[in-house]
Amino acid sequence: MRRAHGRIPRRAIPLLLGLLALLAPHQLQAAWLSDSRELMGTRVSVELWSEDAAAGQRAIDEVMAEIQRLDEMMNPWNPASELARINREAARGAVVTSPEIIEVIERALFYSRLSQGAFDISFASVGQHYDYRAGTAPDDAAVARDRTNIDYRAILLDVDERSIAYRKPGLQVDLGGIAKGFAVDRGIALLRTHGIQSAVISAGGDSRILGDLGDRPRTIGIRHPRRQDEFVVLIPLADTAISTSGDYERFFMKDGVRFHHILDPGTGRSAQGVQSASVLAAHAIDSDALSTTVFVLGVAAGLELVNRLPGVDAIIIDGDGKLHYSADLLLNTTP
Ligand code: ADP
Ligand code: MG
């Protein structure tokens, strides 16, 4: 690079730039662009403002390709994925893996310790036996047997060696409660390298907002947990991540019981007492893990945890449909 540059006479540079400007279209097309795809088992959407529509579309394509790469790496149901390989091999000895998986699992274990196991990626040791589409759940005996394998302390991470080992043979990991947030953060970081200053990336219930709409914040809605296409709260947001975990996302009803996809590691059954938990944080990896965590902890312990974390807020809808806000949100909304 440097040598090639050296060959151009210094005086010629303004002339060359002038020629380039003549060749380039006089006005770049500035535009709001949006795109969405089925990835990570949900709908991933990217919306952004770009001074140059073609460059903006390239940025979106790059984000989608990156999220697809992460999906292929972290989907435990795809036997060819890196996570599936870990689940097969890590009980026999340390498995050297990708920096992305190490980073996500390290953060997951942080939230496990913080919540004393309410958030636990090894929930899958039991969770793998639920099939929400088919409407089937493991029986009590199976849950009792496999529940001992839900234990984040049996996941051994060696960050320097970039390796992971399971201390229990039946332990299985699923990153469904944190990987989408990680992917959204990755997407936002990519958009920044493209000079994008205003964007939203969403992966299902996990969103991160970069910048604002120029003169005003964006409005993000929290869904009504029991009425489709209705919102309970609309909040103006800029430069933040927000994630919602709801018992209405993936579930089936059996004998009047709602079997949904957020499991209480203590029981191996769907966590009770909350219909939806939304968490605001700077990064989507944190809002994602924490929305699942708060859902499992319930209103009292969930708010207590969130109120201890600087820069983190929560809006919880309890089992009766009543709203609960973390302390900072109450301060900001009380006249
Ligand atoms: P989604 O956007 O898929 O609804 P959530 O953030 O609400 O995601 O998390 C739900 C997902 O988290 C489940 O589908 C499952 O993969 C995973 N999960 C369920 N229970 C737990 C738990 N106790 N700890 C960590 N992850 C969990
Ligand atoms: Mg989550």
Image (cartoon, helix red, strand yellow):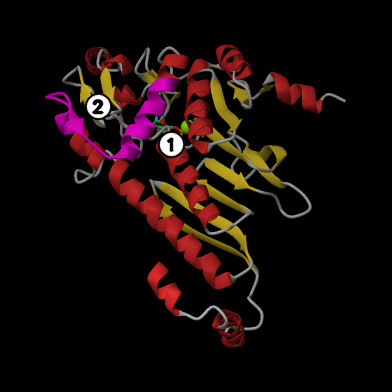
The quadrant where residue 310 appears = top right
- Residue to which mark 2 is pinned: 172
**Residue 264 placement (x, y as % from top left):** 41, 18
Question: Is the CB atom of the residue marked by disc 1 within 8 angstroms of ligand 1's nearest atom?
Answer: yes
Q: Amino acid at mark 1?
A: Arg
What residue is shown at x 25% (from left), y 27% (from top)? Answer: 172
- Direction from residue 245 to residue 29 in the image, left or right: right
**Residue 173 placement (x, y as % from top left):** 28, 29
Q: Residues within 10 Å of mark 1 (few under 14, many from 20)?
A: few
Residue 101 belongs to magenta span: yes
Between 47 and 22, the one lying in front of the other is 22
The mark tally for this picture is 2
- Direction from residue 100 to residue 30 in the image, left or right: right
The quadrant where residue 156 appears = top left
Q: Amino acid at mark 2?
A: Gln
Q: Is residue 134 visible?
A: no
Q: Main secondary structure of the magenta part?
A: helix
Between 25 and 226, the one lying in front of the other is 25
Disc 2 secondary structure class: loop
**Residue 335 placement (x, y as % from top left):** 88, 25
- Residue to which mark 1 is pinned: 250
What range is drawn magenta here? 87-110
What residue is shown at x 71% (from left), y 19% (from top)? Answer: 327
Q: Is residue 287 visible?
A: yes
Between 232 and 169, the one lying in front of the other is 169
As drawn, the label of residue 27 is none
- Direction from residue 238 to residue 291 in the image, left or right: left
What residue is shown at x 13% (from left), y 25% (from top)? Answer: 93
